[in-house]
Image (spheres, rainbow, N blue to C red):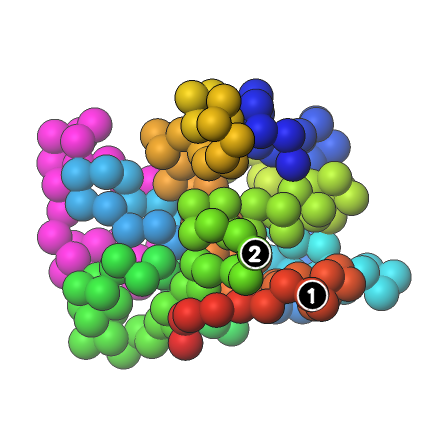
Amino acid sequence: VAAEGLIYQVSEKNFINKEKIPVCDEYYIAGDYGIYNPMAWGYYGVKVIRGKEYIYKIAEYHHSGRETQRPKSDEEYADDFIKWKEQLESEYGKVKNITFDPSAASFIIALKSKGIYVKRARNAVKGEKDDIAGIPLVQSYISSERYLICNECIYTKKEIYSYIWDEKKAERGEEEPVKENDHHMDADRYMFNTFIGYRKIGLENYRYIGGS
């Protein structure tokens, strides 16, 4: 992974129109938690085609308390989540599993009180710093054109083209993303780290640490 410029090397082949998304084998939700910073969720489909897994980011949720000047409570977000999830499930399919970043403890409790159970995201991979854990995995699916993002996921598209390495840290030989406008990128990492994993692309030398 080059330590400068854009983190993900994407092309138009990594984006797909909504009507071309196939019926998938499984569906998942992964999210990055925020109150004043954006709350970012993704609804993903996984489909095996000719023996290989393809990941589709079908829909996203985005709300920024800072941008809108209207922060929401965990309970309000939980209500939003249930409506958003149910609408997508009625259109595509039932969600098999849900994950959020470990900092979302209060939101996870709010969801649990409404009967929604969440798996804490794996945000640590042996050999990778937490801030980049999962980036090589996501890039492997991007490079092989097996991660396809719906064109309607406008915040994800915006972030993926502004998700860059920290140049100052790169000068010191460190690889770390600029921690700005990366909320949907983090949700993607949690999805791939928690539910896809390196074993499925033949990188068995990686293993998860932490998480549950």
Q: Is residue 117 left or right of residue 28?
A: left
Q: Is residue 122 left or right of residue 35?
A: right
At label 1, the amino acid type is: Asn
Q: How many marks?
A: 2
Question: Would you say residue 70 sits in the magenta stretch?
Answer: yes
Q: CA distance from mark 2 to mark 1?
A: 9 Å
Give the mark nearer the N terminus: 2 vs 1.
2
Q: Does residue 23 appear anywhere in the picture?
A: yes
Residue 90 position, x and y percent, is: 48, 63
Residue 140 position, x and y percent, is: 71, 46
Depth check, front residue: 172 or 141: 172
Query: Do the residues bearing badges 2 and 1 touch, measured as CB atoms within 8 Å?
Result: yes
The residue tagged 2 is 127
The residue tagged 1 is 205
Residue 51 position, x and y percent, is: 85, 65
Q: Is residue 111 above or below residue 155?
A: below
The residue segment tinted magenta is 57-84
Q: Is residue 61 above or below residue 199?
A: above
Tag 2 secondary structure: loop
